Image: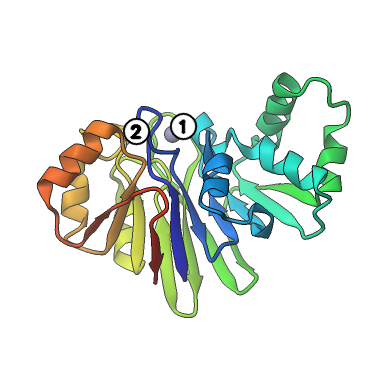
Amino acid sequence: MKLQLIGTGSITAPQTSASSLINDHILIDCGTGVIKELLKQQVNIFNIDIILITHLHADHFFDLPYIVLLRSFNQITNNLKIYGPKNLKKVVNTLFEIGYADLEDVEKIFSDGNTSIVEFDNLEEEIDGYLIKSILVEHGKTKPSYGYIIEKNGKSIGFSGDSCYCQTIDYLVDSCDVSVLECSFPYNSEEHMGPETIEQLAKKGKIAVTHMSLYTREKLEKKNIDNLIIGKDGDIFHI
Ligand SMILES: [Zn+2]
């Protein structure tokens, strides 16, 4: 599988919001700046036919209206399914209401671009030859917050979404060939993992770290941790 790190920053970093792309067609999270970053990295956004949203914080889904609009304007005919937690449809409609109040029929924008939103409690589905599973993670008071595991041809890539250190993260690192883990702050909290946790997890499995503030990135770089990829926007790996 091809893994492309589209964005590797947190909202306080110059890098784009955390987002990853699998085999040019499965996008994990679509927060602020992600559409522009995809275009900068010369990704054909109309090849993306699955988007997995981890949770309903702005830096993980605020760019969704743009992809919905672009597909409609360009009369794209392949289906795009956007998977995410309960209320995803409501919050995306709210973004349309406040951002494009002149649009009278948002449903039509969705149907013109063959775009649909699928809300789930627990996702475990074979889609286009990929097994896609959601996993529940711990992200402070934000519930539900999901990570994902994507499997194909005996290989698996895990995504933490936003999470503190919890059992699910151990499971992810133990069971996936590569885990894309967040490290938002330079310390551990109830919402996020810090560099010390990442250092411990890197002893158990291959990790690419993302969702970093500038200071967190610097702290991780100084640690020189074996088996750890400190993600940069545009990095591509083959797994
Ligand atoms: Zn979050």
Task: From the image, tell me which residue sits under label 1.
Answer: 142
Q: Position of residue 148 (x, y in %)?
A: 47, 55
Q: Residues within 10 Å of mark 2 (few under 14, many from 20)?
A: some
Q: Answer left or right for 172 relative to 25.
A: left
Task: From the image, tell me which residue sits under label 2.
Answer: 191
Q: Answer left or right for 211 relative to 230.
A: right
Q: Position of residue 219 (x, y in %)?
A: 16, 39
Q: Which of the 4 image quadrants contains residue 185? A: top left
* Badge 2 amino acid: Glu
Q: Residue at x 53, y 66 (%)?
A: 23
Q: Nearer the viewer, residue 127 or 96?
A: 96
The answer for how far apart the CA atoms under marks 2 and 1 are is 9 Å
Q: Nearer the viewer, residue 208 or 137?
A: 208
Look at the image and tell me in which quarter the C terminus lies: bottom left
On whether ligand 1 comes within 8 Å of the CB at mark 1, the answer is: yes
Which disc, if any, is residue 54? none
Q: Residue at x 44, y 79 (%)?
A: 154
On whether ligand 1 comes within 8 Å of the CB at mark 2, the answer is: yes
Q: Answer left or right for 195 relative to 191.
A: left
Q: Residues within 10 Å of mark 1 (few under 14, many from 20)?
A: some
Q: Position of residue 155 (x, y in %)?
A: 42, 75
> Can the viewer see residue 120?
no
In what quadrant does ligand 1 lie?
top left
Does residue 182 sit above or below 205 in this rendering? above
Q: Which of the 4 image quadrants contains residue 15? A: top left
